[in-house]
Image (spheres, rainbow, N blue to C red):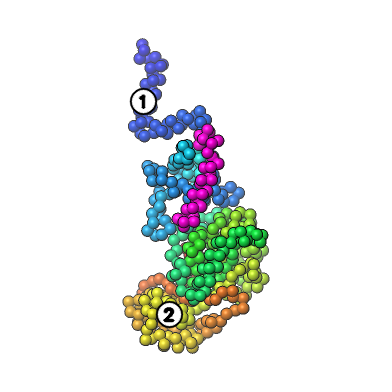
């Protein structure tokens, strides 16, 4: 009789559930669910986007991925870090981690819903109501402090953001471009001036605020193809430890979409528009000139935090309205010339390990006659012949004699009045089996042709960025 009583059956059922929960390691989960029923907890959501990008989300991401409890999780993501051999832990979608603060236990869920491109992300904090009243404010301050510390120590993994579709959303991937000011062949004095300019920018928050100016700095990089403009952007991002936002204007349907994209960029970032001259000349995007001007003036960025670098690259600024590039709109102009002898020596030193060579006087003479090639072209020849420095230098000589005549005559050593900085030097490039500059030009031309074909097929005037 007793065996059939409801009390006995309930007891058995409860015991079985508990046993099952114990066996499957779900007891804690079950307990939490019971607590939830009784509203012991409160849930606080931190969405990735509100109207604009939510900076607290970014900080939380840094903070949560640094928690030691991630290491003890049953399941989490392993991803490459800032350096290529770095492996870091990263929360999986919908994974929950625990944190402890002032005696309270807090649960963070990395909530992910929907599919790309409409996927939404948020961190959801589950906290006991009693703890919330006691610790929430100091806990949030603690998160800010830890995230800032991680950023300052350069532990933050940089990201490259791209607007790859016309949905007005950024897609990102780890930014691991190896270019640094050390690997970039530039005139040493210019390099030092750029570095100190960037360092003083980093310290100038109060100064800009006092002046009532947006804390941003704009650079124009101009010069022929393969002279290191994109590599410079990457070096700048690595130096500042900033993310990179690479804007493809051809993918932006209107001025308001450009605004929206800009509002989503975060502080501590380099915002880049490549080949602006081509875009302005061809007028093949739906963004208007005033949309670009607003962007350059930083009007848009002033409402969502600061600390941004704006970089524009061009092959030439000759046909660009000077008003667009006036001081204040673009702070620093840097010209990237074709190779001269000094840049050649820098490249020979880094690519071939050669500081001096009996063929150097001959090379110098050819450069003095006005011949030149881009640093990318010369670097490529050196890489292809790196097993024999003599052969490499001879191939450069031949290339300068046959392909470089007069190419650099008009550029090298010439400074325009509005240059605020000297011009940088030389470059390099990767690849095997290319022995003449014609081969390289063919390859480079082919690449650019493919890119422009691809672009024109989707109404684009911009090539893809080598940063990618
Ligand atoms: N000054 C330089 N120092 C070192 N490497 C360089 C330099 N300039 C170019 N290179 C090498 O040549 C290749 C092309 O350079 P990069 O893409 O930076 O040129 P670019 O000026 O941006 O060309 P484009 O105008 O076609 O976009 C890169 O792989 C880079 O490594
Ligand atoms: Mg480039």
Residue 433: x and y in percent read: 36, 74
Q: Which residues are magenta?
A: 127-156
Which is in the foreground here, disc 1 or disc 2?
Answer: 2
Residue situated in front as seen by the camera: 430 or 165: 430
Crowd band around label 1 with a 10 angstrom C-alpha radius: few (<14), some (14–19), many (20+):
few
Residue situated in front as seen by the camera: 349 or 174: 349
Q: Residue at x 56, y 65 (%)?
A: 200
Q: Is residue 135 magenta?
A: yes
Judge left or right: residue 136 versus residue 29: right
User: Looking at the image, can residue 403 be seen?
Assistant: no
| Label disc, if present, on residue 345 of the rendered structure | 2
Q: Residue at x 49, y 55 (%)?
A: 151
Crowd band around label 2 with a 10 angstrom C-alpha radius: few (<14), some (14–19), many (20+):
many
The yes-or-no answer for disc 2 within 8 Å of ligand 1 is no
Give the quarter of the image for residue 414: bottom right
- Height in image: 316 above or below 58? below
Judge left or right: residue 208 versus residue 23: right
The residue under label 1 is 16
Tag 1 secondary structure: helix
Residue 275: x and y in percent read: 56, 69
Residue situated in front as seen by the camera: 36 or 112: 36
Q: Residue at x 62, y 76 (%)?
A: 418
User: Looking at the image, can residue 289 be seen?
Assistant: yes
- Height in image: 424 above or below 9? below
């Amino acid at each position: 009789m007793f065996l059939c009583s409801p009390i006995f059956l309930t007891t058995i059922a409860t015991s079985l559930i508990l046993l099952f929960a114990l066996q499957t390691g779900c007891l804690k989960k079950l307990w939490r669910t019971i607590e939830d029923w009784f509203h012991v907890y409160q849930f606080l959501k931190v969405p990735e986007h509100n109207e604009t990008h939510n900076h607290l989300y970014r900080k939380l991401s840094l903070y949560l991925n640094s928690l030691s409890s991630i290491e003890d999780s049953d399941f989490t993501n392993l991803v490459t870090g800032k350096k290529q051999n770095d492996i870091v832990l990263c929360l999986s979608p919908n994974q929950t981690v625990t944190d402890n603060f002032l005696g309270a236990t807090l649960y963070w869920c990395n909530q992910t819903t929907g599919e790309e491109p409409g996927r939404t992300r948020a961190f959801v904090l589950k906290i006991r109501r009693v703890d919330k009243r006691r610790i929430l404010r100091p806990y949030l301050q603690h998160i800010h402090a830890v995230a800032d510390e991680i950023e300052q120590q350069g532990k933050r993994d940089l990201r490259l953001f791209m607007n790859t579709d016309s949905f007005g959303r950024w897609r990102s991937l780890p930014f691991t471009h190896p270019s640094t000011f050390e690997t970039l062949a530039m005139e040493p004095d210019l390099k030092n001036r750029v570095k100190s300019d960037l360092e003083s920018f980093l310290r100038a928050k109060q100064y800009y605020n006092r002046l009532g100016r947006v804390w941003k700095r704009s650079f124009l990089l101009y010069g022929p193809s393969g002279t290191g403009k994109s590599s410079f952007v990457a070096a700048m991002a690595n130096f500042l430890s900033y993310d990179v936002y690479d804007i493809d204007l051809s993918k932006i349907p209107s001025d308001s979409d450009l605004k929206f994209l800009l509002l989503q960029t975060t502080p501590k970032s380099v915002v880049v528009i490549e080949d602006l001259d081509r875009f302005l000349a061809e007028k093949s995007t739906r963004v208007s000139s005033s949309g670009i001007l607003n962007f350059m003036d930083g009007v848009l960025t002033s409402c969502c935090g600061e600390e941004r670098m704006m970089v524009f690259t061009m092959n030439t600024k000759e046909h660009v309205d000077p008003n667009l590039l006036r001081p204040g709109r673009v702070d620093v102009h840097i010209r990237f010339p074709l190779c001269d002898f000094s840049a050649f020596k820098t490249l020979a030193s880094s690519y071939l390990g050669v500081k001096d060579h009996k063929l150097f006087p001959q090379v110098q003479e050819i450069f003095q006659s006005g011949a030149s090639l881009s640093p990318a072209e010369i670097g490529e020849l050196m890489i292809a012949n790196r097993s024999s420095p003599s052969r490499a230098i001879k191939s450069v000589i031949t290339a300068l004699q046959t392909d470089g005549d007069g190419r650099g005559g008009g550029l090298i050593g010439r400074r325009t009045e509005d240059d605020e900085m000297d011009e940088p030097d030389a470059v390099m490039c990767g690849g095997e089996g290319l022995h003449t500059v014609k081969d390289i030009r063919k390859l480079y031309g082919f690449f650019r042709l493919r890119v422009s074909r691809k672009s024109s097929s989707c109404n684009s005037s911009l090539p893809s960025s080598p940063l990618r």
